[in-house]
């Protein structure tokens, strides 16, 4: 099932991950900026359109998919048994889901007055727990590692009990919509299962993509009063899983077997792109493009865009050896979880200290420039944190 995949990191995949992370930070900061063009914002749910902003989340899902074959091959190369491999997948999924649920509850649904601390402090303690649990410790003292991770787990459990939600303050943490990381976690789990069961067979993986999108389509067309509606209520997860599967397919297209000619790689990727675009075009009259609704057209067009971008990066970095410029992205690409949470840590800290950025940072061109500066600053901060041996790994 490893298809002759290398256990070495693929620079072009890391570059795509790093670029996606930079774009994510940029657009998240840009979200609060007024007086900018619509193409720099998320499209409304019913707009039948998408911008590059709407392609950031599916790009993450796609990269997760591209990484799965390599991750599984690497675990097997290290001697993991089947049980150990499945345990790793399950614990990674659990980590993503826990992170997602905590983060989404910190964003809304809380009742600060009923809690024993400000939500900003609660959030900062949560992120401290995350670092304690998932930091990659370099100390040879195994006892110290277990103590630090155990302290992080206890902290998260305590924060879960301290959380209060609802108007009356009697509510507790709920999954809500799982948060971005939670959605990635569920899609990752399902895609890993499908990849292993199919043994990486392309026909089977294409069939799984069709099944996921078909499942979504059936759920959207059923009458709300239909007794079958409950069976097709997870269409969003199915759509997200389809994007991860499409990322797996591209990895197999590019890296299946040894000695594959580059011309064949690009020819197959081109055909794959056409298939995705044509499928999206044919489905668009029935399912408009919408990130909010996670429609099949959004999934297919996003995957096609990722395929085109990755093909270019592979040509530029792996074939033409123009990789010096990727140095800036490497720290974040190898430490994506820490990079992802840093803006949330900064926001919580500023909220706790009752400070904010100047209003000019949220207006027009100045806001765009600030969002870019902020994104670059966060990426640079990760470089410093990496040197301080703070690296998170699920």
Image (cartoon, rainbow, N blue to C red):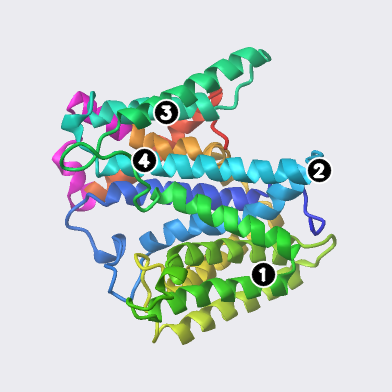
- Mark 3: few/some/many CA within 10 Å (<14, 14-19, 20+): few
Of marks 3 and 2, which one's residue comes earlier in the chain? Answer: 2
Of marks 2 and 4, which one's residue comes earlier in the chain? Answer: 2
Q: Between marks 4 and 3, how big is the CA–CA gap?
A: 14 Å
Q: Which residue is mark 2?
A: 77
Q: Which secondary structure, mark 1?
A: helix
Q: Which residue is mark 4?
A: 103
Q: Which residue is mark 1?
A: 205
Q: Can the viewer see residue 7?
A: no
Q: Which residue is mark 3?
A: 157
Q: Position of residue 25 (x, y in %)?
A: 38, 46
Q: Position of residue 79 (x, y in %)?
A: 82, 39
Q: Between marks 1 and 4, how big is the CA–CA gap?
A: 32 Å
Q: Position of residue 326 (x, y in %)?
A: 57, 45
Magenta stretch in the rendered image:
346-366
Q: What label sits on residue 340 in the rendered view? A: none
């Amino acid at each position: 099932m490893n298809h002759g995949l290398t256990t070495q990191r693929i620079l072009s995949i890391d570059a795509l991950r790093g670029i996606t992370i930079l774009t994510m930070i940029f657009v998240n900061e840009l979200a609060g900026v007024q007086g900018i063009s619509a193409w720099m914002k998320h499209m409304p749910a019913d707009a039948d359109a998408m911008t590059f902003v709407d392609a950031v989340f599916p790009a993450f899902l796609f990269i997760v998919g591209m990484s799965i074959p390599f991750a599984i091959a690497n675990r097997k190369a290290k001697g993991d048994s089947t049980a150990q491999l499945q345990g790793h997948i399950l614990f990674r999924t659990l980590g993503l889901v826990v992170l997602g649920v905590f983060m989404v509850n910190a964003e809304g649904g809380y009742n600060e007055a009923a809690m024993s601390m400000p939500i900003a402090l609660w959030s900062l303690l949560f992120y401290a727990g995350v670092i304690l649990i998932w930091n990659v410790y370099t100390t040879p003292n195994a006892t110290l590692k277990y103590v630090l991770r155990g302290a992080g787990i206890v902290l998260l459990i305590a924060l879960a009990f301290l959380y209060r939600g609802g108007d009356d303050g009697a509510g507790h943490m709920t999954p809500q919509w799982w948060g971005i990381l939670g959605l990635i976690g569920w899609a990752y789990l399902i895609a890993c299962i499908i990849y292993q069961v199919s043994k990486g067979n392309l026909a089977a993986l294409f069939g799984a993509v069709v099944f996921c999108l078909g499942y979504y389509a059936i759920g959207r067309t059923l009458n709300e009063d239909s007794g079958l509606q409950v069976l097709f209520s997870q269409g969003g997860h199915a759509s997200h899983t389809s994007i991860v599967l499409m990322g797996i397919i591209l990895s197999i297209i590019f890296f299946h077997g040894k000695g594959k000619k580059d011309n064949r790689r690009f020819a197959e990727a081109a055909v794959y792109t056409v298939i995705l675009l044509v499928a999206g075009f044919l489905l668009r009259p029935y399912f408009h493009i919408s990130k909010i609704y996670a429609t099949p057209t959004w999934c297919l067009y996003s995957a096609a865009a990722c395929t085109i971008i990755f093909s270019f990066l592979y040509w530029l970095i792996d074939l033409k050896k123009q990789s010096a410029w990727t140095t800036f992205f490497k720290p974040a690409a190898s430490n994506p979880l820490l990079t992802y949470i840093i803006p949330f840590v900064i926001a919580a800290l500023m909220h706790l200290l009752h400070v904010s950025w100047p209003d000019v940072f949220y207006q027009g061109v100045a806001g765009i420039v600030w969002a870019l500066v902020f994104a670059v600053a966060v990426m640079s901060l990760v470089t410093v944190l990496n040197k301080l041996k703070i690296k998170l790994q699920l």
